Image: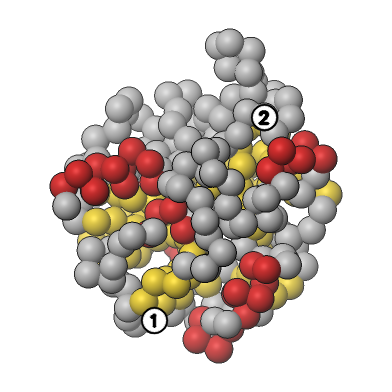
Amino acid sequence: MRSFLWQSILLGFAAKSTAIFQGAITTDPNAVGVVRLQTGDILVGSGVVIGNGRCVITAAHVVKGLSERNLSVYKNKVEQGKITPTNDWVGASKINIPSQYQGTSNPQEEPSAYDFAVVELASAMATSPWKVSQTRGGALDLTMYGWGNISRNPPDPNMYPDELRSAVNKNSNIQGPECKDWKNFVGAICVMSSKPNSVGRPSAEGLNCDGDSGGPNVANGHVIGVTSGKNYACGYQTAGLLAGVSGSNQEAFMRQYQSTCGFQFGSP
């Protein structure tokens, strides 16, 4: 069990980074819907509350192999404009991962059809849920939210993140030509960065880090994807790869939970 948890830590997180996060701490009250997913005291990823507050969307690789008994969902609170984590356990009653999810915890090794999951909560949360949107081609200004902690390298898995972070990415390319090498990753979003890494390769540093996997990618108030991973082959200056929550097969999967989760699709 212990080795499995450590494998989850090493493989289940989004891309690591030691750079300063390119964004400010959000004061958006809607972001209280961004929750922490943990096994015990170990942060395994982030998620976003949708619809009526009874469901969370996250990355499939975060919860793959976990059961309702060893996955805890924690909500957050807003005090004087600052969002902080709490130990208020919400729990999970059911985890639904698409059968088409075929990849390992590292989608770079084995690209999947898509990388997201629905977690049905045991009870509704007092929160401001996000809207769910269909992914479309073209460029949008995108905000990424996550509870990943960027301040420690390597991160201490037994310490809670102390703040929800956000990064605003201008002109994020959704299903664009830069993602041609991710043709099997349906609904991929390429986040472009102007900062190459130390060896001149496109850099994911500063955009996502440990624990951000599953966190929402928001455009115009709608969740259009969740943080998944990175792929340096996805065009020059590509900083991250995000999995769309809807579009083609994803939309069919998500529609199964419209009545339970109480959400509707819309345009970003």
Pick whichever, 189 or 49, lies toward us: 189
Question: How many numbered circles does the render carry?
Answer: 2
Residue type marked 1: Ala
Q: Quadrant of residue 233?
A: top right
Answer with left or right where residue 119 lies relative to residue 99.
left
**Residue beneath the point at 45% across and 48% down:** 104
Question: Mark 2 — residue?
Answer: 233
Relative to 225, is 68 above or below? Answer: below
Answer with left or right where residue 118 lies relative to residue 245.
left
Mark 1 residue crowding within 10 angstroms, few (<14) / some (14–19) / many (20+): some
**Residue beneath the point at 45% across and 72% down:** 96
Residue type marked 2: Ala
**Residue beneath the point at 72% across and 47% down:** 183
**Residue 40 percent location from the top left of the image:** 19, 56
Q: Which mark is residue 223?
A: none
**Residue beneath the point at 60% across and 34% down:** 231
Q: Are marks 2 and 1 in contact (CB under 8 Å)?
A: no
Question: Mark 1 — residue?
Answer: 124
Mark 2 residue crowding within 10 angstroms, few (<14) / some (14–19) / many (20+): some
Residue 83 can be seen in this image: no
Pick whichever, 141 or 108, lies toward us: 108
Answer with left or right where residue 188 lies relative to residue 32.
right
Q: Quadrant of residue 179?
A: top right
Assign a secondary structure to mark 1: loop
**Mark 2 or mark 1: which comes first in sequence?**
1
Quarter of the image with the C terminus is bottom right
Residue 201 can be seen in this image: yes
**Residue 15 percent location from the top left of the image:** 47, 35
Assign a secondary structure to mark 2: loop
